[in-house]
Amino acid sequence: MSDEKMKFRVGLGVTGGIAAYKAIEVLRLLQKSDCEVRVAMTKHATEFISPLTFRALTENYVLVDDYEPDNPDPIAHINFSQEIDLFLVVPATANTLAKFANGIADDFLTSTYLASTAPVMVAPAMNTTMWDQPATQRNIANLREDGVYFVEPVSGELACKTVGTGKLEDVENIAAQALSLLTKKKTNSPEAIGKSQDLNGQKILITVGGTREAIDPVRFISNHSSGKMGFAIAEAAAKRGAEVTVVSGITTVEPPDGVKVVPGISAEEMHTSVMRELSGKTIFIGAAAVADYRPRSVADAKIKKEKKDSMSLDLEKTTDILAVVSENRHQGLTVVGFAAETNNVVDYARSKLEKKNLDMVVANDITKKGAGFNTDTNIATIIVRGNPKAIDLPIMKKRELADNILDEVLKLKTARKSA
Ligand code: PMT
């Protein structure tokens, strides 16, 4: 192919799964779109399909093992990885994802991943149980954090005759996503070169952590919030160019750099701080776990036991900060709430969206392993006003979820602007 016609150079990695034969179709589609494709395979992939097939289709030596005597290039993994615009892995097995996530480079394909400066896109395919394994999901979350692009597997009948998530996405869609990424990369679109400064000009106010409601000078009512989720959003927003203010309750983690932090220890103090900081903000996110009730009166001195077998506290409702912000919103303010639920998660979250007239709700089932309070990961469903379809997200680092939430906020703002 002449250089004028050739648009992109793609390194196609093929790993050892039953879907390996579908990589041929992806290769053909990329070639039809004027891409020059070179292929690297794992040894197990060659059990499913012969390197000769790819060699015939690409007119290039297919790399499986650097040390093969007939390998024409003595430092193949370096040269191969430096001469591509995209490293696309179809299918990506759980084993290969695990190696990528942990920097293991024990064959040509995994060495190429480590040596490559090109963007990496993977299209996983595997049995549902393997996909759902916490280890696999952890590796996926880490790889996303490292900037790897995913073409998610779909649900369907798998080779093992079970039905579930793990089926390779349609080859047309894989090729389309690869081409779209290559095009964005070429035109330097912010989406492709990282999140960039896409929140430049946005002024974001976030409530973070748990509140403390005093009973007496010694005791208080509180909850398990660590502030990890709220600070993750603050960090992501600041990195993407937003001006970020956090009203912080009790937290166990350090606030990120570049963020203004204002205290709001009790629900009342948090409410006061929020109202003081709200002017001119373009986005409000209520990530704090605010007490719904507080003692009606706070004792001046330590309450004594006085041989009582029981005691009761008279509680009164606190101000619902999120509802007040939403009710009194100024023009251009997008209001996002969280919903920490233990059952009927999406239904309860939707009813919060309606009752508090929110633009978006991030629902998390705090009973799920790896979700909710004081974890580094979360499992969330994002519900956007006007969108009947909830966005179900898999387990991921709170920092990654933060970017997903901000992406949806930005989409909503852009859609409203152009409406
Ligand atoms: O801090 P982490 O350890 O990382 O934990 C994260 C988290 C579980 C706290 C977070 O992901 C979360 O779900 N935050 C909201 C917790 C909560 O209080 O949910 P809720 O369903 O009770 O409240 C709904 C919304 O109203 C929330 O946005 C809350 O901030 C807001 N609210 C509630 C009561 C109140 N008086 N004022 C409020 O603003």
Image (tube, rainbow, N blue to C red):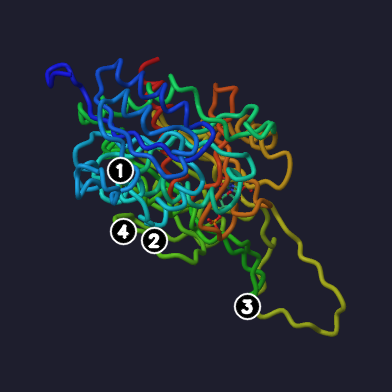
Residue 300: horizontal and vertical position, in percent?
64, 76
User: Is label 1 in a helix, a strand or a loop?
Assistant: loop
The amino acid at mark 2 is Pro
Distance from the alpha carbon under mark 2 to that under mark 4 = 7 Å
Tell whether label 4 touches label 1 (CB within 8 Å).
no
* Image quadrant where residue 11 sits: top left
Q: What residue is shown with label 4?
A: 257
The amino acid at mark 4 is Asp
Distance from the alpha carbon under mark 1 to that under mark 2 = 16 Å
Please report whichever mark, 3 or 2, sits nearer to the chain's N-terminal start.
Answer: 3
The amino acid at mark 3 is Val
Residue 116: horizontal and vertical position, in percent?
26, 45
Q: What residue is shown with label 2?
A: 255
179 to 299, vertically: above or below: above
Mark 1 crowd level (few <14, some 14–19, many ≥20, 10 Å Cα): some
Q: What residue is shown with label 1?
A: 240
Distance from the alpha carbon under mark 3 to that under mark 2 = 26 Å
Distance from the alpha carbon under mark 1 to that under mark 4 = 13 Å
